[in-house]
Image (spheres, rainbow, N blue to C red):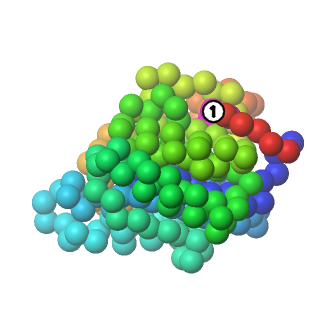
């Protein structure tokens, strides 16, 4: 059975990790495991009108704290949204530094089939930087044209509650259909049925090291 003790979540944008594996983060934190979260874009240029440029940074800090991540385990970069492909080598260097600093035994990152260009870069460079680590792709169905559900993490009701509460901190993103609580709960229920649990999150495993 997989028992990672030091987990790193890679989020191209500030809310991606909460959307893809927020329940898993809450579970790992509850179990006393060391969870780190690195987000690469603060997306200030794509905020709805009327929001301050640092809105998503503040929302991310509140959301990850609700899940149980320590403030000093949250790492925020400030690349521009949709421009990560231009900085591939620089991002690889950032990821290699994270590997050296944190030395995670599990990395969670966007899935290989994710069509968003920023997500693709973090996936590809993440695999290179953490090639000697267990890593798995989290599910963002609106971006995934295919997804192999070959790994499930069961969630308790309170862990799903923490995920939905964390996502509600992203008030600037509340209008997006994938941020709606009924969708989040329905997907968790579907994944739970697939692994004989009330709720779960699904992943693609790319490398498993024990």
Residue 93 placement (x, y as % from top left): 51, 58
Dividing the picture into quarters, in which one does residue 143 lie?
top left
Quadrant that contains the N terminus: top right
The residue under the point 28% across, 71% down is 54
What range is drawn magenta here? 201-205
Residue 84 placement (x, y as % from top left): 35, 49
Relative to 122, say whether 35 is above or below: below
Q: Looking at this view, is 60 or 186 the one in front? A: 60
Which residue is at the far left?
49
Dividing the picture into quarters, in which one does residue 56 lie?
bottom left
Residue 88 placement (x, y as % from top left): 41, 48
Quadrant that contains the C terminus: top right
How many numbered marks are there? 1
The residue under the point 72% across, 48% down is 133
User: Most prominent secondary structure in the magenta stretch?
Assistant: strand
The residue under the point 51% across, 39% down is 124
Which residue is at the far bottom?
72
Asked whether residue 150 appears in the rendered view, the answer is yes
Residue 126 placement (x, y as % from top left): 55, 47
Q: Residue 74 in magenta?
A: no
Asked whether residue 156 appears in the rendered view, the answer is no
Q: Secondary structure at mark 1?
A: strand
The residue under the point 59% across, 44% down is 128
Q: Looking at this view, is 101 or 162 the one in front? A: 101
Relative to 106, say whether 69 is above or below: below
């Amino acid at each position: 059975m997989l028992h990672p003790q030091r987990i790193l979540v890679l989020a191209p944008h500030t809310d991606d990790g909460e959307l893809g594996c927020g329940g898993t983060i809450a579970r790992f934190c509850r179990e006393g495991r060391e969870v780190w979260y690195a987000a690469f874009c603060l997306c200030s240029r794509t905020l709805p009108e009327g929001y301050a440029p640092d809105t998503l940074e503040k929302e991310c800090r509140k959301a990850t704290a609700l899940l149980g991540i320590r403030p000093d385990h949250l790492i925020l970069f400030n690349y521009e949204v949709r421009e990560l492909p231009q900085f591939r080598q620089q991002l690889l260097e950032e990821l290699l530094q994270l590997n050296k600093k944190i030395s995670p035994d599990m990395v969670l990152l966007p899935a290989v089939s994710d069509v968003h260009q920023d997500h693709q870069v973090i996936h590809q460079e993440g695999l290179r930087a953490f090639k000697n680590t267990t890593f798995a792709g989290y599910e963002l169905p609106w971006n995934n044209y295919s997804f192999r559900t070959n790994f499930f993490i069961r969630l308790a009701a309170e862990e799903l509650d923490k995920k939905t509460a964390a996502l509600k901190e992203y008030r600037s993103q509340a209008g997006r259909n994938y941020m709606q609580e009924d969708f989040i709960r329905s997907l968790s229920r579907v994944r739970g049925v697939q692994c004989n649990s009330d709720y779960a999150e699904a992943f693609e495993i790319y490398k498993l090291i024990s």
